[in-house]
Amino acid sequence: MPPNEKCPSCGAVVPDWHREWHTFPDQVLIFQGAAGMECPLCGAVVMHDNWHLPLTLAPPSNGVGKVNRDVIQAARWCALGVGKLLADYLKTREGGPYARLWSVTEVQQADQFVMNNP
């Protein structure tokens, strides 16, 4: 979420921003406008406060920080949401932009953790 939204920095359409891949406390910070999420294509810090669209750039002067997507959260979402391993999802159109976020080992460990802790 949100799907098919342009990055306000690079202008590229991101198939899915995967806000839900952030931990719940980080999602709260994003909602409150206290933190931004990273564009998976250009690395810009993007705001999605109150889940309003369009996405906006974080103002450079207000000290809004970036929160990172969590590999375990992503693997859990993949298992429950699309019935795939994160490793496989990262090869799809929607998941591809995120393939560089974690190492192969981190993704494999997250997939294994989720399989062992349903």
Image: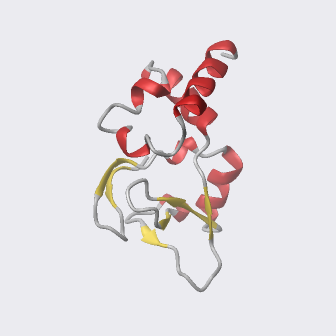
**How many discs mark residues in the rendered view?**
0
9 relative to 61 in the view: left or right: left
Residue drawn at the location 43% of the way across and 71% of the way down: 56
48 relative to 11 in the view: left or right: right
Residue drawn at the location 46% of the way across and 26% of the way down: 87
Q: Position of residue 97 (x, y in %)?
A: 37, 46
Q: Position of residue 47 (x, y in %)?
A: 50, 66
Classify 49 as above or below 116.
below
Q: In which quadrant of the rendered image does the C terminus lie?
A: top right
Classify 2 as above or below 84.
below
51 relative to 12 in the view: left or right: right
Residue drawn at the location 44% of the way across and 58% of the way down: 39
Q: Position of residue 112 (x, y in %)?
A: 62, 18
Q: Nearer the viewer, residue 20 or 72?
A: 72
The outermost residue toward the bottom is: 61
Q: Nearer the viewer, residue 16 or 54?
A: 16
Classify 75 as above or below 59.
above
The outermost residue toward the top is: 116
Q: How is the image coloured?
A: secondary structure
Residue drawn at the location 50% of the way across and 62% of the way down: 48
Residue 110: quarter of image: top right
